[in-house]
Image: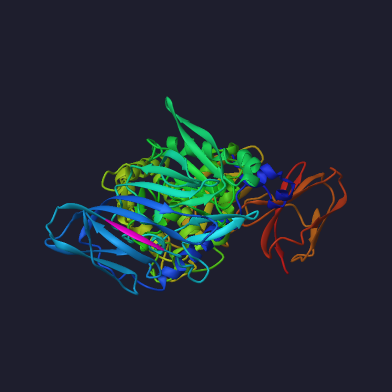
Amino acid sequence: MKKVFLPFVLFGLYSNIFAQIAPQKNFSEKISLSEQKNAAAFLKGTLEYNGDNYDLKYHRFSWNIDPDTLFISGEVTSYFVITKASVNQISFDLSSVLIVDSIKYHSSILTFSHAANNALTIDLPSALSINTLDSLSVFYHGNPPNGEGFGSFIKSDHEGTPIIWTLSEPFGAKDWWPCKNDLSDKIDSIDIFVTTPQQYKAASNGMLISEITQSGFKTAHWKHRYPIAAYLIGVAVTDYQTFSNYAHYADDSIQILNYVFPESLSNAQQHMPDVVQSLELFDSLFTLYPFVNERYGQTQFKWGGGMEHQTMTFLGDFSFDLMTHELAHQWVGDMITCGNWHDIWLNESFATYWTGLAYEHLFNGYYWNIWKKYELDDIISEPGGSVYCYDTTSVERIFDSRLTYNKGAMVLHSLRWIVGDSAFFAGMKNYLTDLNLTYSYACSDDFISHIENASGKNLTEFFHDWLYGEGYPSYTIHAAVISDNNVQLTITQTQSHNSVSFFEMPLPIKFKNETRDTIIILDNTFSGQQYTVNPGFHADSIIFDPEMWIISGNDTVISNIEVHSSLADFSVFPNPFTDFLTINFAGNKLQQAEVYDVRGMLVTAVKADNSIYGSLKFSMPDIAKGVYFLKLIFDDKIVVNKIAKFE
């Protein structure tokens, strides 16, 4: 299928509707920065409490929140099963800034200690034996910490109206409630009761069961009956307006409940429904929405990005890529969560690639090549860096937009190229339906195993190079006609980083002329490898990786297969050029002149007037310096010349 690459200069002509849908060039950078800011405070310290002696089963939250005041009070009741013999203490993680009023255990009040390292340690009246199911309630209040201006419980305003919202990824939940703050124990189910002044609405996880107003206060009850990580629990309170959209699947539908600021209602009603088609697409490509027995929701908040709170995404704007990225997290991040921060790519790379898949399948594929080009340009902007996160002490590295988001997404795209669509999507579905992983945690090996089983291929080398290794390849392709339509290709590869000695990849090479084209795939296993191919017709040009399957940079095709005219027929000057390029020609009718980059992508084109003698001038002050190919289309031949741009 032919893909259309659109010059980015046309973006200035798009309407506001297209601006909301089109991929943002720096989208991953923006969203990763918001993740970095939120995680920064936690990652300067470590969790020091002992929470491995129990398994959480249930939380009942009862909170009092007034968005006009940075304050929380309430009760958290926890049900747990003891996992070790003779347990005398239970510990939670709770900011030492918050004040614990009391802890109730059945009819007793328990003693406790609340340390500066945020460990809340509770003394049980007698030792509990393994497999015992028990419960206790923590009553507390206080002003949650803001920590360097990036807290997890935030007071802000919109158009002068106060709002309080939470954002706990990765370990900020302790700033506003007593939790088990790790990536090992999901809570089986929760009930949330939020009491606010009656003019406000509270948005949270799961299903809204009731809103009861009494004595000037409103209590919202939210119920969620799926396992959930502590950092995916969220609450937002302000004067929200609500409306619903519906996504359809098979013979049923699912509600998408939206909470937005009154001043944003019209804009939200125009753009928020765009996420419906993404939800329906992911249902068809992968598996049914993982919380289908409840609903999906989107809540507006005052943050420069989004947060995939389970069943209720918080959004800073209504752009298509943000809404789709956060929706994708409901499968990859929420239903299946990375089991450690080394494997954060299982959350962020996957959600980023799923956003790309939405651009591939929706809007007639109009933005698909644009999205891939944005990803690749960012990836090759620096020579090093692995998708796998070796350094989990650095928040900047965990949420690195170039590596964790963009490179990981395009590694998935290359993996799809290696194994084929059938195996790729089958492997992804098997990963998403693995009962050992669903509503739980996963590591990279879990995903790799499913892809290998679906494809029947050993992918050790691929993941060694692309997941754990650094950098990317650059290719130089020398092409020469040796007889009739036979073309000899010599392909050399260099690597941007020495952690990978060679990237073994099947390389797609496109041969084309004015009426025909074909793609031949070459298995490239060493640098300097030679191939003799016959495309079945006389090709006048060669394009490397036209569909952008492979992460590579600074690729060059050097070819003599084009039909060349004598130097007397035309001249190109200056070459190299800076801003302008002039073509003088005589003896043949020039129809059009085109400039391509080394990837074979059209940069610009100018139509001629079909005169036999003339001059054509290109203005190209804004293109990057480097090597390009000038293609002159005459009435009886095509001429291709290499040109170079200097700054």
Image position, residue 634 (x, y; %): 77, 45
Asked if the stretch drawn in magenta spans residue 391, the answer is no
- Left or right, 592 with respect to 213, comes to right
Residue 374 position by quadrant = bottom right
Q: Residue at x 39, y 36 (%)?
A: 292
In the depicted view, which residue is nearer to us: 634 or 466?
Answer: 466
Q: Is residue 457 visible?
A: no
Q: Residue at x 69, y 65 (%)?
A: 625
The colour mode here is rainbow
- Relative to 185, say whether 417 is above or below: above
Quadrant of the snapshot with the C terminus: bottom right
- The mark total stands at 0
Image position, residue 554 (x, y; %): 58, 62
Residue farthest front in this picture: 215
- Left or right, 483 with respect to 417, comes to right
Quadrant of the snapshot with the N terminus: top right
- Left or right, 36 with respect to 577, comes to left
Image position, residue 176 (x, y; %): 41, 61
Looking at the rendering, the stretch of residues picked out in magenta corresponds to 137-141
- Left or right, 80 with respect to 126, comes to right
Magenta stretch prevailing secondary structure:
strand
Image position, residue 371 (x, y; %): 57, 50
In the depicted view, which residue is nearer to us: 264 or 380?
Answer: 264
Q: Residue at x 40, y 41 (%)?
A: 425
Q: Residue at x 50, y 39 (%)?
A: 257
In the depicted view, which residue is nearer to us: 623 or 42?
Answer: 42
In the depicted view, which residue is nearer to us: 647 or 157?
Answer: 157
Residue farthest top in this picture: 251
Q: Is residue 128 visible?
A: yes
